[in-house]
Image (cartoon, rainbow, N blue to C red):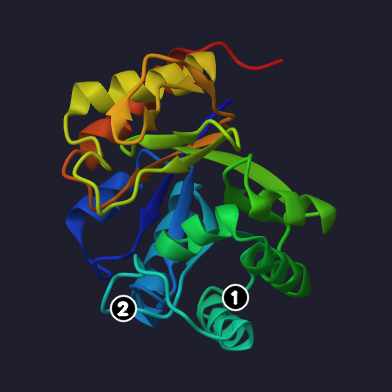
């Protein structure tokens, strides 16, 4: 069964929509201070997750609250890993990690970064990571014995590089990066969930071709304006799908 995950705790400990979203998701990726969140919000959402039977993952990023972790930070790998140590310690004991924003995107294609992150994850005894199946970070994590929860996105569009055969998220600098209309996001997600494919963009233009996209879990961003209705709709779609196996 495909699960529903959400990046959560990025707007403080008492945001009503974030708290409501916790009723509809299976995995809460809790912001740990790198791009958003603090000790109070971490503890609040950890408690809610425990009460509601929601799995938790540490949501880690470049240390860049100013840009919400959505801009690549040029820094030594050793400095980045020290920051990840500090972030992860806010959610000590979590066995799952999802990287955020620019760090997530960079780890898809940057083999040096992905290798360093995979070794760090192993050193922290992380058992699984939410990441694109066809990514550098996934490949290195597999080599280290870390389970990949293949992730797709419910309200983000994809670029396709026909030379590499790799899907990547459309940069947020582009006007078409996100899907703002609820029905379009549901249709996009249904194709991923039912068919394991997505209609990507190539050089900024939408394509009719269907590109395979493995998905064990589908993500909603809590700061999307359609987040709550999308979570409710996806929960219904997932519940209606036949169970795998």
73 lies left or right of 55: left
Quarter holding the N terminus?
top right
Q: Name the residue under label 1.
A: 92
Camera-nearest label, 2 or 1:
2
Q: Bin the neighbour count of mark 1 within 10 Å (Cα to Cα): few under 14, some 14-19, many 20 and up.
A: few
Residue 242's x, y, as percent?
Answer: 56, 11
Seen from the viewer's position, the closer of residues 25 and 70 is: 70
Q: In which quarter of the image is residue 72?
A: bottom left
Q: Disc 2 to disc 1, how far (Cα)?
A: 21 Å
The picture places residue 173, in percent across and down from the top left corner, at 25, 54
Whether residue 56 is visible to the viewer of this picture, yes or no, is yes
Of label 2 and label 1, which has the lower sequence position? Answer: 2
Between 212 and 151, the one lying in front of the other is: 212
Residue 211, compared with residue 71, is above or below; it is above
Residue beneath label 2, please? 65
User: Residue at 33% across / 73% down in the picture?
Assistant: 36
Relative height, residue 194 to residue 91 (above, below): above
Up the image or down, 62 lies above or below 194; here it is below
């Amino acid at each position: 069964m495909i699960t529903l995950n959400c990046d959560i705790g990025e707007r403080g400990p008492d945001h009503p929509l974030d708290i409501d979203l916790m009723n509809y998701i299976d995995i809460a990726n809790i912001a740990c201070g790198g791009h958003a969140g603090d000790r109070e919000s971490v503890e609040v959402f950890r408690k809610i997750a425990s009460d509601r039977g929601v799995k938790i993952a540490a949501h880690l990023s470049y240390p860049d609250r100013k840009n919400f972790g959505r801009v690549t930070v040029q820094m030594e790998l050793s400095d980045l890993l020290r920051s990840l140590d500090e972030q992860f310690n806010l959610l000590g004991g979590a066995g799952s990690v999802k990287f955020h924003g620019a760090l997530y995107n960079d780890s898809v294609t940057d083999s040096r970064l992905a290798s360093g992150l995979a070794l760090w994850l192993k050193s922290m005894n992380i058992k699984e990571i939410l990441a694109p199946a066809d990514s550098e970070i996934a490949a290195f994590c597999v080599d280290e014995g870390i389970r990949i929860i293949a992730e797709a996105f419910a309200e983000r569009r994809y670029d396709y590089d026909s030379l590499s055969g790799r899907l990547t998220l459309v940069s947020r600098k582009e006007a078409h990066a996100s899907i703002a209309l609820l029905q379009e996001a549901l249709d996009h997600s249904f194709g991923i969930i039912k068919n394991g494919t997505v209609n990507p963009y190539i050089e900024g233009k939408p394509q009719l071709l269907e590109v395979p996209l493995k998905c064990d879990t589908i993500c909603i961003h809590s700061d999307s304006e359609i987040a709550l209705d999308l979570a409710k709709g996806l929960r219904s779609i997932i519940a209606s799908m036949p169970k795998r196996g």
